[in-house]
Amino acid sequence: MLARWLARVDLFLYAYLVMVLGCIYFLFNYVEGISFTERAGESVLFRACWLVLYLLLLLQILRNAHGFAAVLSRSRLFLIFLLFAFVSQLHSESADAGYVKFGMYLATILFGAFLAVSCSADELVEALFRIGAVTLLVHVLLLPVIGSDVSYDALHRATILGTEAYAGIFGHKNLAGAFFGLMVIISLVRSLAGRRSQRGSSGAVAACHVMALAATGAAGPLISLVATLLVTLGLALIVIGRRELAAIYWLVLGFVGLAVIAVPTEWLYGLVGRTANLTGRSFLWSVWPHFFWQHPWLGYGFSGFFNGLENAPSAELTRMAPWNTEFGSFENSYLDALLQFGLLGGGLYLMLVATAVRNVVMFAFRASGMFWLAPFAVLIFVIIASLNDSSQLLHNYFGCVLVFWCYFGPEAQLGRSTVSVSRLSLRDLKA
């Protein structure tokens, strides 16, 4: 009976999603009395939870080996990428910890495959919505408990609400911002494409997530959310058959984009309380070619550049940086992919992301479930957000999970039979 209980898909799904979403990332520090300045990975409880989840993931793979084999056998691009990534890892001078992180990265990818095999898009949206609603409630209730005790912004910048940044037990404002940005998208999709009884509550939850996002002080997720909603609306107009309106919309959006480019960057960044140097990102991006061309073909291996050793390649970056700043990534998933896997593996990874985009567009046109727009919306959010963070290359994080779910998943789900109620709600909005 215990084995059956541990093997329950729903329980495993929710537990793994809660962990990769990062919504209790620093709860482990709080429970064990570890300072929020320390990484959650230093917590014994945190490591134990992940070990259990890895074992349960292996159990799920063994229970449905045929389904996993079918999905992976159709994914030749992924298998070739995996081969080059492994060669890059062997070629690198990474410590043993680098191989451990690479293993955790593979486990994160396999969880994306698990979602493809075991969940429809509708089921995943419902799971994410419920997790988001509960997390939002806990996030608000914890404000008087830990809100005044922790500084979530070392520069003490005010949010667009005029308040201090608050990230709760996420521990970092960007983790919290990315989570609430994703939940805004999930809630809006559920509100627009779900059943009529769900629209009001989903819309209200989406509004609350927007406020929580604004209170985190994270500018990147906020900008990514706005851009995602604009692009997603354009696709939705095409899918529901409003081609003329879609053409006008994209034309106007193009002119708006040109106008934004013409506006001084200092003024644009000032709208969200940031400066043109993007908190050091402009420096990182300017020196990236210097390191990339030292190992252009196979790269440094996964986590090989920032490996934490005294003679790590990142030590030179620290010496070059203003005030000897220590960085953990180049704050751009695509630059990090090319740096870690080289032109060969990194190029394959970019092709993999492009394939994921193709899959979710096909899914939007061909799927029959309610939330046909969700895979496209969440993938675009991750892709845009990854321009100024390393989320796609983070093991045990939802950015990586969603990219590979969209690569493996939506196409695999097209064969499943679901109730065809998808486009009615969005059509009703036209009236």
Image (spheres, rainbow, N blue to C red):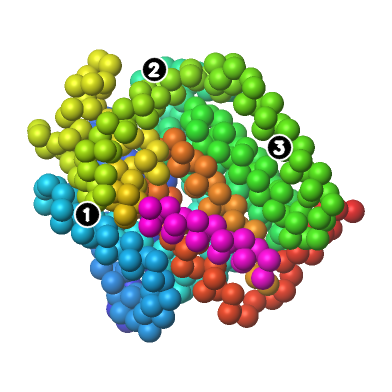
Q: Residue at x 21, y 59 (%)?
A: 87
Give the amino acid type for the residue marked by disc 2 in the picture. Leu
Residue 362 shown left or right of residue 313 in the figure:
right
Q: Nearer the viewer, mark 2 or mark 1?
A: 1
Q: Quadrant of residue 282?
A: top left
Indicate yes or no whether the magenta region holds residue 263: no
Could you tell me which secondary element the residue under label 3 belongs to? helix
Give the amino acid type for the residue marked by disc 1 in the picture. Ser
Q: Return the residue at label 3.
A: 254
Which callout, 2 or 3, points at the residue further toward the start of the chain? 2
Q: Is residue 85 above or below residue 184?
A: below
Q: Are marks 2 and 3 in contact (CB under 8 Å)?
A: no
Q: Return the residue at label 1.
A: 88
Q: Return the residue at label 2.
A: 155
Could you tell me which secondary element the residue under label 1 belongs to? helix
Q: Is residue 320 above or below residue 121?
A: above
Residue 249 in sight = yes
The quarter in which the N terminus is drawn is: bottom left
Residue 347 shown left or right of residue 217 in the figure:
left
Q: Nearer the viewer, mark 2 or mark 3?
A: 3
Point out the stretch of residues depicted in magenta: 347-366
Which callout, 2 or 1, points at the residue further toward the start of the chain? 1
Number of other residues with Cα within 10 Å of mark 2, as a class: few under 14, some 14 to 19, many 20 or more: few
Residue 246 percent across, percent down from the top left? 78, 50
Q: Nearer the viewer, residue 230 or 398?
A: 230
Residue 361 percent across, percent down from the top left? 62, 61
Residue 307 percent across, percent down from the top left? 18, 41
